[in-house]
Amino acid sequence: MAAVTAVPARLERFYVPDSPTQQLAARLRAIGSTAYLVGGSVRDALLDRDIVDIDIATDARPDAVEAVVRPWADAVWLIGQRFGTVGCEKDGERFEITTFRADVYRAESRKPEVTFSDDITADLSRAISR
């Protein structure tokens, strides 16, 4: 992975060494997984809005994410775990960590079945194709 050389000022806090975001990314890398800063947290930073929670996308499955964050985080919640999201808080930063997903459409239904994916491209294409 290429090193980040220029970070917009509004996103700098996520790249500070030993920040909760970097700690979490390191913990996910330690189990062989990837971590991407995504979603509303990026949008809000770019629009100079308050960031309520930090959205992380990963190829780690929810049970692996829970195992990574439980000994590290100050609080963990599993309300969205069935859909791939584990929430946690560390040092006042709230995270929503979601496993990459892919939609599978069945002939008998217009509603997709969400399955987990190992590919961020498949996950990102879900938002584009809707």
Image (spheres, helix red, strand yellow):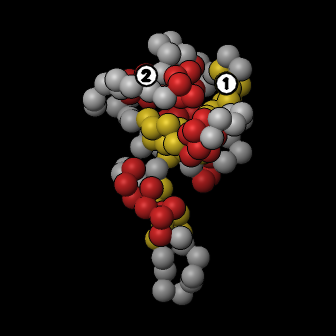
Q: Position of residue 107 (x, y in %)?
A: 48, 86
Taking 63 as reference, is 74 above or below it? above
Which residue is pictured at 45% across the width and 38% down the height? 36
Task: Give amino acid for label 1.
Answer: Glu
- Where on the picture, by quarter, is residue 28? top left
Q: Label 1's element? A: strand
Mark 1 to mark 2: distance in Å? 16 Å
Task: Give amino acid for label 2.
Answer: Ala
Q: Position of residue 92 (x, y in %)?
A: 71, 20
Q: Is 7 left or right of 111, judged from the image as shown? A: left
Residue identifier under label 2: 26
Q: Are marks 1 and 2 in contact (CB under 8 Å)?
A: no
Q: Position of residue 67 (x, y in %)?
A: 54, 29
Q: Is 51 left or right of 1, judged from the image as shown? A: right
- Where on the picture, by quarter, is residue 71? top right
Taking 57 as reference, is 7 above or below it? above
Q: Position of residue 95 (x, y in %)?
A: 63, 33
Task: Please tell me whether mark 1 or mark 2 is closer to you in this view.
Answer: 1
Report if residue 45 is visible in the image: yes
Which residue is most to the bottom?
Answer: 108
Which residue is pictured at 39% across the width and 36% down the height? 34
Which residue is pictured at 59% across the width and 76% down the height? 111
Q: Which mark is residue 93?
A: 1
Which residue is pictured at 53% across the width and 70% down the height? 130
Q: Which image quarter holds the N terminus?
A: top left
Q: Residues within 10 Å of mark 1 (few under 14, many from 20)?
A: some
Which residue is most to the top?
Answer: 18
Report if residue 53 is visible in the image: no
Q: Label 2's element? A: helix
Which residue is most to the left?
Answer: 2
Q: Residues within 10 Å of mark 2 (few under 14, many from 20)?
A: some
Q: Nearer the viewer, residue 126 or 77?
A: 126
